[in-house]
Amino acid sequence: MKTEEIEEAIAVMFASADNVAFKEVVKGVSKATLWENPENRSYGAFTRFVPGLDAGRHTHTKDTWLVVLKGAYLYKDEAGEKRVGPGHFIRIPGGHVHWSGADPKEGALFYEEGQGEFDLIPAK
């Protein structure tokens, strides 16, 4: 890495979900990427689900970490259901089949980090 890249990598970062530009990535899901590592595509982003979103059963290649800010991220796997509300954290291991969605009235807003580029692989 060049010196300026190292300085940029360790710089303080501040962001508010109220003041970032969200971009719809799939119907009902918008992201505002805050940082990414171009060497391995790890990232951090604010993500917003519209009310009632149903992302279906799926998995991700890499681990994903979420902290909910508003609304609720709904999660279900073979162990049961979880309502991940404001101030709650969930780690979803890569390769773990699950269903996710959003509160039917409030939707969900959360901060998300991943170990690699984000993907969503539908499960059978």
Image (cartoon, rainbow, N blue to C red):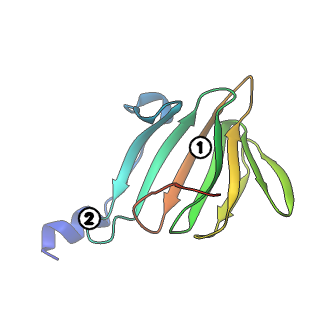
Q: Which mark is residue 52?
A: none
Q: Element under label 1?
A: strand
The image quadrant of residue 51 is: top right
Tell whether 109 sits left or right of 118.
Answer: right
Find the residue positioned furthest to the top.
Answer: 105
Q: Is residue 5 above or below residue 66?
A: below
Q: Which residue is mark 1?
A: 110
- Residue 8, image x, y percentages: 24, 62
Q: Amino acid at mark 1?
A: Phe
The tally of labels here is 2
- Residue 114, image x, y percentages: 49, 62
Find the residue positioned furthest to the bottom.
Answer: 1
Q: Element under label 2?
A: loop
| Front residue of 7 and 67 | 67
Find the residue positioned furthest to the front.
Answer: 124
Query: Does the CB distance between marks 1 and 2 fall below 8 Å?
Result: no
Q: Which residue is mark 2?
A: 38
Tell whether 47 sits left or right of 35.
Answer: right
Assess disc 2: are there few (<14), some (14-19) or many (≥20) residues with their C-alpha within 10 Å of its C-alpha. Answer: few
Q: Is residue 121 above or below residue 86?
A: below
Q: Is residue 40 above or below residue 69?
A: below
Residue pictured at 42% horizontal, 29% vertical: 19
Q: Amino acid at mark 2?
A: Pro
- Image quarter in which the C terminus is found: bottom right
Compute the Cα span from label 1 to label 2. Answer: 23 Å
